[in-house]
Amino acid sequence: MVRIYQPTKSAMQSGRSKSDEWMLEFPRNSVALPDRLMGWQSSSDTTRTIHLKFPSKEDAIAYAEKMGMTYHVIKTGSRRTKIRGYADNFAANRRQAWTH
């Protein structure tokens, strides 16, 4: 069963770049074993490294159905934004202390 989801932004991103893409990932078919020397995980499963990108959820679902794959769509949460002005950083009624 493949999973279809919309990736979240990394902690290093501040914008919404690539937030409209949808990913299709394959499940792990074999167990990942640690390497004895380095401790890295290794596996003979090459499908785990494949990440297909689609412009919409419907395109990803259509691809999975066309290829005869069973799929699971992971819903994304809504994002709330607080619209503030730059001057709000220096307002006198701030809840946090203003320090430099």
Image: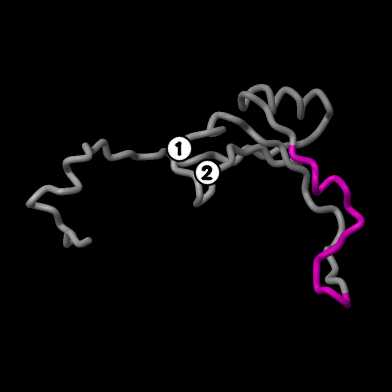
68 or 19, nearer to the observer: 19
Q: Label 2: how many residues lie within 10 Å, few (<14), some (14-19) or many (20+)?
A: few
Q: Residue furthest front?
A: 100
Q: Position of residue 46 (x, y in %)?
A: 88, 48
**In the image, which residues are magenta?**
36-51
Where the C terminus falls, by quadrant? bottom left
Helix, strand or loop for the magenta stretch, by majority: loop
- Using the rendered view, name the quadrant where residue 87 is placed: top left
Query: Left of 50 or right of it: where is 22?
Result: left
Q: Which residue is under mark 1?
A: 15
Q: Position of residue 44 (x, y in %)?
A: 92, 56
Where the N terminus falls, by quadrant? top right
**Residue 84 disc label:** none
Residue 49 among magenta residues:
yes
- Amino acid type shown at disc 2: Lys
**Residue 9 disc label:** 2
Which secondary structure lies at badge 1? loop
Query: Left of 16 or right of it: where is 3?
Result: right
Q: CA distance from mark 2 to mark 1?
A: 8 Å
Q: Position of residue 68 (x, y in %)?
A: 83, 29
